[in-house]
Image: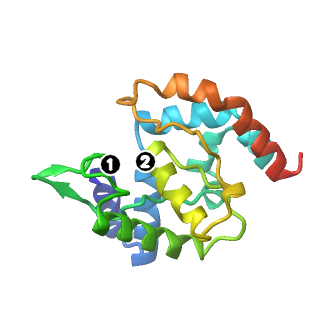
Amino acid sequence: MRIALQAAKAGFKAGLSDEAVCRQAKEEAGFAGTMRTHLVEMLDALELHRYLGIGSSGDLFQDHHELLHTTSLLRFPVFVAGNNYNGTHPSLRTNPFLNRTALSSLQDELSLMNQPLIIPLGKNVEQVLQQLAADGGLDARDCLWGFPHPSGANGHRHKQFASHQESMRSKIRALTGQ
């Protein structure tokens, strides 16, 4: 949020249009910092960049940002007992308000895309996407199941990634027809 606000402030100061300011803030803040580093490392290990015809998955955050659409299940800040919501307590799937909000926002964004490769970052996001797929709201074949959340706080990400790496790589090959 801080990075997005700083980017927006700089964009307004530079005289950019509202649309350009929003685009710049989204591009700069999307999975910024070590989370982006971990994400790029995992995507490169899956060879996603090869199938997209770019040098590295890191280029998705630079020169090829038009190939990437980042989003969150909850697009707005959520606080629980005065703290940033961590995605687990309360459970996104069992809390009616959070679940309804996540599904609605996600359906809106998915309607804008044509045959996306959806990479749910972490088990909580994956559970919501599986619910949406079971309800017919998305094609489960478009999802890269088993991808861990790239946060440094996720101490199991290496093990989880390794256990799903080959199936995810195969899915990418199949979706790209290579």
Structural distance between the alpha carbons of marks 1 and 2: 7 Å
Is residue 62 among what the camera can see? no
**Residue at 29% over, 61% down:** 95
**Residue 8, which numbered label?**
none
Is residue 170 among what the camera can see? yes
**Residue at 72% over, 41% down:** 48
Which of the pair 115/70 is nearer the observer? 115
- In this rendering, the answer to whether 39 lies above or below 74 is above
Q: Is residue 149 left or right of residue 112?
A: left
Image coords of residue 110 (percent x, y): 58, 70
Q: Where on the picture, by quarter, is residue 76?
A: bottom left
Do labels 1 and 2 touch, CB within 8 Å? yes
Image coords of residue 68 (percent x, y): 60, 57
Which of the pair 170/33 is nearer the observer? 170
Q: Earlier in the sequence, mark 1 or mark 2?
A: 1
Residue that numbered label 1 is attached to: 87
- In this rendering, the answer to whether 73 lies above or below 100 is above
User: What type is the residue that disc 1 sits on?
Assistant: Gly
Q: Is residue 67 left or right of residue 79?
A: right
Image coords of residue 177 (percent x, y): 88, 51
Quarter holding the C terminus is top right
Which of the pair 9/65 is nearer the observer? 65
Quarter holding the N terminus is bottom left
Kind of element beneath mark 1: loop
**Residue at 54% over, 28% down:** 160
Residue that numbered label 2 is attached to: 124
